[in-house]
Image (cartoon, helix red, strand yellow):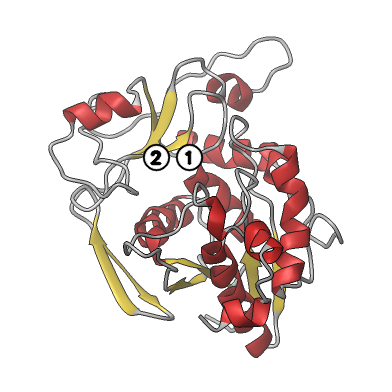
Amino acid sequence: MTEREYRGRIAPSPTGFLHLGHAMTFWHAQQRAREAGGKLVLRIEDLDRDRCRKEFAEAISEDLHWFGLDWDEGPDIGGPFAPYVQSERRRYYLEAWEKLRVGGFVYPCKCSRQDVMQASLAPHDENEEPIYPGTCRPRGCVVEAAVPTAGNESAADTAASTTGTHWRFRVPDDERIDFVDEGIGKQSAVAGRDFGDFIVWRRDHVPAYQLAVVVDDAAMQISEVVRGKDLLMSTFRQLLLYRALDLRPPKFYHAPLVLDESGKRLAKRDGALSLRALRERGAKPDELRSV
């Protein structure tokens, strides 16, 4: 593999005010981009329509600039890979979903999260989805199913918007997946044991996180993904998607998390540690970055 220009990204979601944990992970991303003489991309991940709110979206740029972050491409300044807002990129996700369907990598699933939690025998972390028990998984090889169309609607639009149906990626059971993390070294997981079949298209007609970030990172030529260690298991799922879609994966760097006093990672519900609240209390960005 030949070296390519370093391109990093920060990808906040407007589902709440950004907190110190987000900011520190983004700071790591900016530092690595600057040290490599590369570029940093801002992408807004606003696919969760029920939780995303206009005031949170409007606060992102202001709060990140206050903390000391800057970027070379993004929804506010444009760039060669626009749009940089996920809600405006649906056609790219549909194209990827269709490729997965035709390739036999995905199958429709009626199971709710509660169904999976009740049926799964494998323990799971509170931040991780339980291992799917295979209730709707086809036996043998996944085969391409015929997809009806209506009028001028494409096959992908019709299938991906099937009411009440998720689409799951079928993982290759017992395959060991390895990658070398740029921060914490070699990482391994076994498909079907450490994680199961995962959702790539949700029943509410929205592409799932795993699919959307793979499509966007590849399209925007991101060379290294910097994110928190809580998303480590997602990397194994996404590596399978890169392979299925015949896309070149980036490198990965999983940054340490900022924890609260009880040792738990920060969440957006911890409003007292939001960047907005900290600024209102007179906190200084350079002091926060040194914590």
Instruction: Look at the picture and state if 167 lies above or below 69.
Output: above
- Crowding at dot 2, Cα within 10 Å, few <14 / some 14-19 / many 20+, comes out as many
What residue do we see at 61% from left, 14% from top?
A: 149
Q: Residue furthest right?
A: 77
Q: 110 or 277, which is in the foreground?
A: 277
Q: Is residue 78 visible?
A: yes
Q: Is residue 172 left or right of residue 65?
A: left
What residue do we see at 34% from left, 58% from top?
A: 233
Q: Amino acid at mark 2?
A: Phe
Q: Is residue 276 left or right of residue 158?
A: right
What residue do we see at 52% from left, 17% from top?
A: 162
Circle 1 residue: 100
Q: Amino acid at mark 1?
A: Leu
Q: Secondary structure at mark 2?
A: loop
Q: Residue furthest top?
A: 151
Circle 2 residue: 105
What is the x, y in percent for residue 216?
63, 54
What residue do we see at 29% from left, 26% from top?
A: 114
Q: Report how many numbered discs are placed on residues in the image.
A: 2
Q: Secondary structure at mark 1?
A: helix
- Identify the image quadrant of residue 261: bottom left
Q: Which mark is residue 2?
A: none
Q: Is residue 36 visible?
A: no
* Mark 1 vs 2: CB contact within 8 A: yes
